[in-house]
Structure formats: structure tokens, C-alpha cells
Amino acid sequence: TSEYCSSIAISELSADVLRDLPTAQRFALDIGGSLSKIVYQSKRKWRKTFVVYDENTDSHLYSTQELEKEADCLHFIKFETRLLENCLDFIYDNLKGSDGRGLEILRNSPLRVTGGGAHKYRLAIEAKLGCVVEKEDEMTCLVRGCAFMLKHIPGELFSYEHDSSPPCCFADELSDGGEPFLLVNIGSGVSMLKVENETTFTRIGGTSLGGGTFWGLGSLLAGTSDFDELLEIASQGDHRNVDMLVGDIYGSESASSVHGLSADIIASSFGKASKADCKEFSKPDLLRSLLITVSNNIGQLAFLYASRHQLRRIVFAGFFIRGHLLTMRTLTYGVNFWSQGSVKAYFLRHEGYLGAIGAFVRGLEKDRRIGVLTGSWAENLCTSSSFDVGSWQGMAALELDKRKELTDFPLLRDRLDYAPDTWDLSQDLSAREYWLNCFEASIDRHQQRAVLSQPDSPSAMERGEAFRLAYQNFFKEARANPVAFGQLTVRRILDVQEHCLRESGFPDPFWELKREENEVALGGLQSRLSHLASLPSADLPAALIRGLLGGNVFDWGAGRVAELLAERGKQFGLNEAMEQLQPRPWLVDDLDAWTSRLKAGVYTCAIVFVDNSGCDLLLGVLPFAIDLLDRGVKVILAANHGPALNDVTIFELRALIRRVGSFVPRVADALSSGRLLLAGTGSSSPCLDLRYVSVEVADACRQEQVDLVVIEGMGRAVHTNLYAKFSCDCLKLAVLKNAWLADRLGGDLFSVICSFEPAAAAAVS
Amino acid sequence: ATIAAMASRQLSETKLRRRSMSTSYRLPPLPWFGMDIGGTLTKLVYFEPSLDNAEEEREKVAHIRKYLTSNVAYGTTGLRDVYLEMPNVSFLGRSGTLHFIRFPTCSMSIFIDMAKDKNLKDLADMICATGGGAYKFESDFQSRLGMSLLKLDELECLLNGLIFLAERHPLECYYLPEPDPSRSDCVRQPYSLTRQSDCYPFLAVNIGSGVSIIAVRGPRDWNRVSGTSLGGGTFLGLCCLLTGCETFEDAIALAERGDSNKVDKLVMDIYGGDYELFGLRGDLVASSFGHMMSVDKRAEAKPEDLARATLVMLTNNIGSIARMCASTQGIDRVIFTGNFLRCNELSVRLLAHAMDYWSRGSIKALFVQHEGYLGALGSLMELVDPDSINNAYCTSESAQTASDDSQKMSSQNE
């Protein structure tokens, strides 16, 4: 009966669900009336690549090693409360299994428990696990949990938009923690909390008509007490048979013709249900009416409290919602109807886990261990369950991996106005079809490459298959439900691909290819530099841009290019790539504007977000950067921290630039004098989300007074950031190596984007 | 009293028609009726002129008068609320008695038959009517009775009726100085609400099938600020479904005997006592019907407990919305009207207590004796231009009448 909430069943209570238990460090519980949630932190072992650079002994540029490394992980599991004791037994056994070390750690600090069942199950938990249980206040946990999710998970917040398909629109308007908002917790009863920031909130009101009212009255009316069954029955009913509508009182014609009001507006809930009408009412109709009555009323009260306290945003949470479409629709309707659109209703994708993570955070605060949470936590898209808004499912499992601490890119013109992704595949059906097909068709290629990247591993074949299954499963879910993983974008798909590879133990399938390309390109650098040096100085800026664009053709992520590279191998060099480029004028051609601006010599420091290894970096970007250095402009080269496709990582970049320095003295000088800086972006994606960059990059931008942002490549400058606005000049460079993309932007394959956006213009537009 | 009344554009139309009427009907022919056709109940106010100045009363008028005043029940469903009767009222220069009659709106067809039977058509060709039913049944009145309905704005009628009664009838408006939901002997204290007593602003909360909430700042200065579909119709509908009762009176009687704590989950049921962090007392309802998902608790809950829980839930919810609206509007007096409060002491006490408790005494809840008939009365008053109504009221006998009324009230209370 619990399929709608997709919690785990007892038969599923296994190491696959409660992963990494033997290394679990801390637990927190949220025990609800029907569902309970557990959150724990573990040490997970990952295969990771390390770049080792030794110029004296190695025949290669650098060597890459794969090692196992521990990293923190947060696990969230949802299960039926009646299985609580089985779950505790399972946890006990696992912790005991790890030499009793796990149990010892567990007993070191109190176990934080929140939710209605905290009181009831306290003794049972203490007896089973031998630890001290500390009750945590529900509302406090909720607020902490809400802040945690909003901070770490992009697209956590969404609104219900009835006219969209699917009806969820993602937003992250609250993530900056600016304006206070109203958090409405719909549990048995309803509490309205005014949230000022992560830790400050006030309970400004509530109502006793809450989830318990739907559940209790629904049980009386339907004769069954299963909450999800009640919702299911309600979804089949028609409330108009039970409720008295405006049309019933005024007559359906005059309601609209005289008053301009919809005859469907409910004048009296259950108004037709009195005995005077001598009718039999169906359970679905009654339950639907009840659901609408309760959620409409909560929506109205929430609006009243919000407007009383001048709050423009309402976030609904609590077990009553559990992703139920009709509930969200009615709550939203109530808010919209009464506020005339001046107040907006939001929901949270991981709403079910707010209490549990809140209790976890509270525990860390109390134990003065809040440092455990420093850094950023990212959704593991491979191991987390999908979010199914249309069919009652909440999240069953969620895993967050600890990352470097990430922050906003300081040069965004308007942080709140920034949306990284150019296309929303959740809403754009044809774009979705195209990209899902496109990426799904590449699974084989990626599987092969992954297996080949570990020739010495006997388990590589098996893990390659695991990668395929996990990745294929994503496509199945994303087709059935385009918001299964939040907003669906090309960036999201690429993230899933990276997560599935990492999860299957393939941290860097392209490592060898990247090194090979880097070595080849490095061999051509000197002659490339000489060629550029021979050009009249007036032609240099254009030649550098052309070279950079030619270099950007070398992208193993693009199917057409991968074919070309495979066909022509080493015969396909920078010159061949430049021949592929669209002749000028380009699709977006600001080359002249850029050239004259560059010659004006106005820049202090440029940050260049680099893309592919090999020709792209070494023959395209590097000469461009050297030219900037020659012109007295400082340069920060920003590369990914983690591997993604054939994109260069910061570790490879460091090795490469040092090698370049050995034969290009200008580079060695710039590096040693701090005029050339190398920074890791904190990302492991072929795309670029500027809401989440490393502190290193953000600090460098401030310290060096960066006044030019250069973004290159399809992933960073087209799929993302195409419309991003900056507070300084920006140069976006990309070659459209994909026919669909070219078509969408009104060009052909290998069309060129060379977009120069001066800061002043950006501020005006 | 419905959400539809929000469309106050209807008002201008009404005023237009009233002006044209006032010239042609300076003193309309008898009998004088005002009608309020709601979603559940139709309310009728009938002015019975005193015999001494009814010399021109025709035979048919006398016939109708005798029929209405010699009966307290009409057909199977019509009833006259004798206890609300107001004698010695001066209206349009006449003195007489106001009678208050109601019947379920679903019996409208029977009413029309009866009106036909009594040849009402021969006396007047128009009835002043308000409420949504004035629209819904207009064509029935036209086709079956040959009478037209003068459709009037229901909220304006309500407010006119309210002020008329409050000024004419010193005990019309009252409050509970010490509201206590658990005590059935709460003292009702009269409250003076007249144009002279600086009665504006106030919030009018009319609880019929649904609920309308109107902010009133002056005689013609009002707007509907909110409302809810959780009203009297919800109470009766849910009670019928949950307890098998058949009438509002039965449902109220059940509720008076019941114990809602058997049905509702209290703060103490969840937190073991008070929820101290937020200052919530343990005996407050945390979740209405919150115990009823338990099979055992369902088996224990009696129909009267369910009726009580339904009443408490809806009453408190209305109180909560009303209080929010009052404080948002900066208003500290809330007048509750509508038939939900008829013979419903419990809700009166709950509302009075809830307003007092949650506003920490800053908002006062007021109630009226003729709670359900304000709209019908207001529509009766639309027989003539409001200015002439005012003139008609200001007669020398008003003081006399008022004291008579107060005597009548106090004797009833004994």
C-alpha cells in the first residue's frame, strides 16, 4: 500500500539501501506518523585520479594514477514508521559488524530525533542502539533543514504552474537568504513560520485544519485509514457533487454574466451534503471535496499571514503535501486567488527530508561540530531516487556528496536574475526529445571508453555494464517524468553521466586520450607561437580568436567531432579544424568590437574558463593568454577540479603550464611573478554554473580586480551562460559542433559564436 | 452570503433601479415583503401594519396577513421565528409588526405555488429580493407567478438591515463580557451600535452556507475583504455525513452534548503538555479530527462528539480568518451575523472566546439577535429611497418603541 510514497519496504532493508553503514559517523531521525526518515553521514571510498608530474623521470608529460580516496557523504532514507524497529536492528548489526567501532562512535554523542514519534520511540531507540536520544524541536529542525536544502541544492524550490506541462517550474529565488519568507508546515496541524534567515524564525500562527484533518475526517468518510489510499481515492472524485458552487446559488448563467465570476467557485464546502438533498455521495467525491477544503483553507490562511507580515513568498512543507499534485494545485490556487498574484507559493523537492537533516544540523551545532558541514553538498544524481511529482512519490533515497566549498561568481551582474541554463528541457518537448536521444545514443561510446581507461582492472567490464544500466535508467525516468531530477537541462544530463561514471568506479575515462592530445598539441605550440609572432600586429587579435575557435573544435563530447577525430586521427590538426569554421561574418560576430577594445588596452586582469585538453587549451587558449600577458593584462586560467569528458582539469593544467614554461620563458616568468594564475573552478562538469564556483576563483577575481571574463566552449558558453550578464566585459566564444544547437540559434554546423558584451551594454540591456 | 457577492459592480445597477423606483413607488402597496434567497435557506421579512391604520387594506391583503400571522408553520418546511417578532415598529410612516419567516431554498417551488394560491400577483408585481437565489429563481417567479424580482446587492442589504435593527432595537447587538466556551450561562451584554454611537469602522462576518467578510467604514463605504467556503453549509453537510442527523437543529443539539477532545488531537496529545517554545497551551486543538485516523478512536467517538468537533473546527476557523482580516484592516470590532449562529450559543461563545484569546483582548466580537434576517430586512427597506427611509424612522415614537422592545427582551431572557 505504500507504493505511492515509495518508501523502502522491509524486504529492501539491505546494504543497497542503507549504504556505507559500517562507516556511518552520525545519525539523525525524523519519526512521523506514517513515514520516518533517517539521515547519516558516512565515509565513502571513491576511485579518484591524481596527476603526478615529474619532468626528470617520466617519458610522458605527466602520469595519472587512480587511487581510492575517502569522502564524506550524507545518506537520506525514508521508510514506514512501523518498520522503525527493524531498521534500528539493521543499523545495530552493521555498526557492530565494523569491529564495534561504529557503535562506539554512535554512542559518543546523543542521537538527535525529531518528529511526532520522537517521544513515543525514545526508549525503544535507546534500548536498541544503547545511545542517548535527544529530542529536537520539529519547527526548529524544519527551518534548519529548509535552509540547508536551499543552500546546497540548486532547483530545490519549485512552484506549481497549472498551465505548464509538467506543472513544476524550478526557481532558486530563496537560496540567497535575503528576504524573509513564510514557511508553512502542514503536519497533523499547521504552523506558519516567518523565517528571517537560517536560524531565526518566529511562529506567527497556525490552524488545526491540517493534514490530520484530512486524514481523520477522510478516514471517517471513507472507512479506511491509509493516508496514501485516501489521496488516491480523492484523485478520482469530483468535488462539484458535494460542494455548493456559486453557480448552484446564482444559477450557472447569471454567476458569470452578472458577476463575471466563475460559476465553479466554491461557495460552501460540503454545502450539498446535507440530508435535505437526500443524495448518496461517492467516497471519491467526498474525499476530493475534503482535500480541496483543507488545502484551500490552508492556502488562504497562509496568504493572510503572509500579507499581514509583508511576506511575498510562501514555502509549503510537511507530510500532507508529499508531492501530491492536486494538493499543491489547491494550495497554490488558494494563495493566487486571494493574493491576486502578489504572493507566490513554492514547494520543495526534498520536502520530506527537511526535519531529518534539520535534526542532523542541530546535533552538529550542539556538539560544536558544525565544521563537519563546511563545504558544499551536491546531489548524487546516480544514487538518489527520482522525484515524481505526478504520482504521489516523494524521494525514497537521497545522497549528497561533499564537495569543495562553492560560492557565487562575484562578477555576475545580478545574482538573482542569473539562470545558468539556456534551454529548459523539462518544458521544451522537442529539445528534450533531441537531447535525450542524442545522449542516450552515446552510452555505448562512453561505456567502451570507460572500460578501456582501466585496462588492468579485472572488474572494469562489469562496472562498465553497471554504468550503462544506471545511465540508461536515468533516460527511462527522464522520458517518463522530465522533472525526475529537478529541472532537466543539458547540464543536468552531463552531470548524471559524470555521476554514473564516478559511481561505477570510472573517475576519468578520458585520462589517456587527454594526455595524448596534450602531448601532441604541446609539440605544435612552439611553431604556433612563431607563426603568430610573424603576423602583423594588427592581425594578431583576430588570428588568436580564430585559433581559439579552431581549438574549440576538438571536443570529444560532440558526436560529429568524435567521428572526425577518429577518422582522421593525427592528420586532423588546428589548421584543419580552423578550416571547418564558418566563414565570417559569423553567427554572432563581435570580433571587430573585441579587437578595438583589446587594442585600447583597458584591462587589468582576465579570467578565462577553459574547455578541452590538447589543441583547444594549448594552441587556442594559451597563445590568446600569452598575448594578453604581453599586453600587460594579468590572466587567470580557470579549469575544472574534477574530470569531465576531455576537459582539462586544474591538475593537468598545472603540469602542462609548467612544461610550457620550460620552453616559453614568458610563461615561466608570468607564472613566477604571479601575472599568470591557475585556478580550479570547483566543478567537474563540461558546463558552468556560476552560482557554484570555488572560493579560490571567487577570491582571485576580487583580489586581482578581474575586468574581463572569457568563457569558451559549447558547454560553458552556449548550453550555459549564453544569456548570462556580467558586471565587467565578457567574451563568449564557441563553435556549434552540433546541428540541432546550430539550428536553434539560426545557423549551420560549425557556426561560430563570438560574442563580446561590454559591461556598459550589459548594464543597459 | 456568498463569494459571488464580491462583485460589487452589481451595486451600481441596483442603485439605478432604486432611484427609478423611488419616484414611481413613493409608498408601495401592501403587503410589504423583503426576501433573501440564500444557498440553503430563504429568509422572508413581512411587515404587518397595525389594524388601526390599515383602513385601505384590501381583502386579499387581509387574507395573506391572516395566513401569515395566524400560523407559525407554512407547508411542511416554512417556519415563523416568533421569538424574533418585532411589534410596534414604525416603517414608512406606518406602525406595525415585523415578522421573520424562513424556509429551505430547495422548497422554493412550493413557495411559488403558495404565492400563486394566495394570489400575491394581484397585489404587487414585484418583490424585493436579495441573495444569489434572486438571480437563480427570477425566471421562475416571472413565468409561474408573473412577478418580477427587484434584485438587490446582498451585502448592502445586510448592512442596511444591520444598522436599521441596531438603531431600532437596543438589545439587538450584544457581546459576551466573559466569554467561556465551557459555560452555557455566559452573560450577554447589550452593545450600542448606532450611527450616533460612532459605530464605524467594523468588520461584518456573515456566516450563511459560506462566509462573507466585509470591512465597513461608513454608511456607504464598505468592501468585501475576504470570505471562506467553510461555513454553515459545511457544518451541516459534514454533520449529516458523519452522524446521520437531518437538520441544523439536530446537528446543533448533538454538538452541544458532545466532547470534541475525543475526536481532535490536542497540543498535549503531541507534546505531552504545552508546546512551550511557541507558548501554545496543551489544551489547544493541534489537529481537528486528528485522532480519527485511528480505528480504535473512531470506534469510541460518538455522533455527538463528531458533531461537536465539526462545530468547533468550523467556528474556530471562521474566527481565525475574521481575526486576521480585522487586524490587517486595523479594525477592532467584528460583528458576526448569519443563520449559522441561530440557536447556536456554542459557536457564539467559541467565537467570542477565540477573538478575545488570540487578539489578547484587543478585538471585540459582537453578535445580533436577528442574525439571519438582516439581508431580508435590508431588502424590505429597499422598497423606498434610503433617504425617505431615514425620515420614516425618525419619528417621535422611536424611544417608546425601543423601551417596549427592551422589556420584551428581558422578559424573554427570564
Image (cartoon, rainbow, N blue to C red):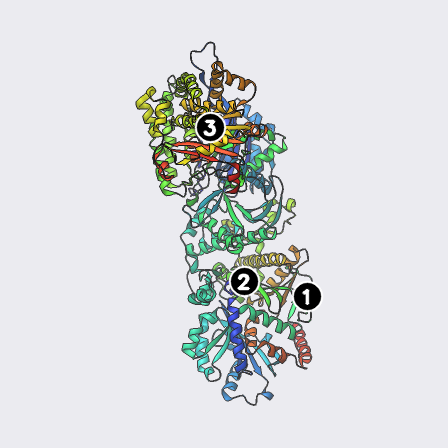
What's the residue type where badge 1 is placed?
A: Val
Return the residue nearer the eye: A729 or A237.
A729
Residue bearing mark 1: B187
Q: Residue furthest top?
A: A57
Q: Could you tell me which secondary element the residue under label 1 belongs to?
A: loop
List x then y, in percent, for residue B111: 46, 76
Q: Could you tell me which secondary element the residue under label 2 belongs to?
A: strand
Q: Could you tell me which secondary element the residue under label 3 belongs to?
A: loop
Return the residue nearer the eye: A224 or A623.
A623
Q: Quadrant of residue B333?
A: bottom right
Tally of marks: 3
Which of the image's four quarters has the N terminus of chain A? top left
What's the residue type where badge 2 is placed?
A: Val
- Kindly identify which numbered label has been placed on residue A341: none
Few, some or many C-alpha atoms within 10 Å of disc 1 (few <14, some 14-19, many ≥20)?
few
Chain where mark 1 sits: B
In this orientation, does residue A484 appear?
Answer: yes
Tell if the residue under mark 1 belongs to the same chain as the one under mark 3: no
Residue bearing mark 2: B211
List x then y, in percent, for residue A350: 49, 39
Residue bearing mark 3: A684
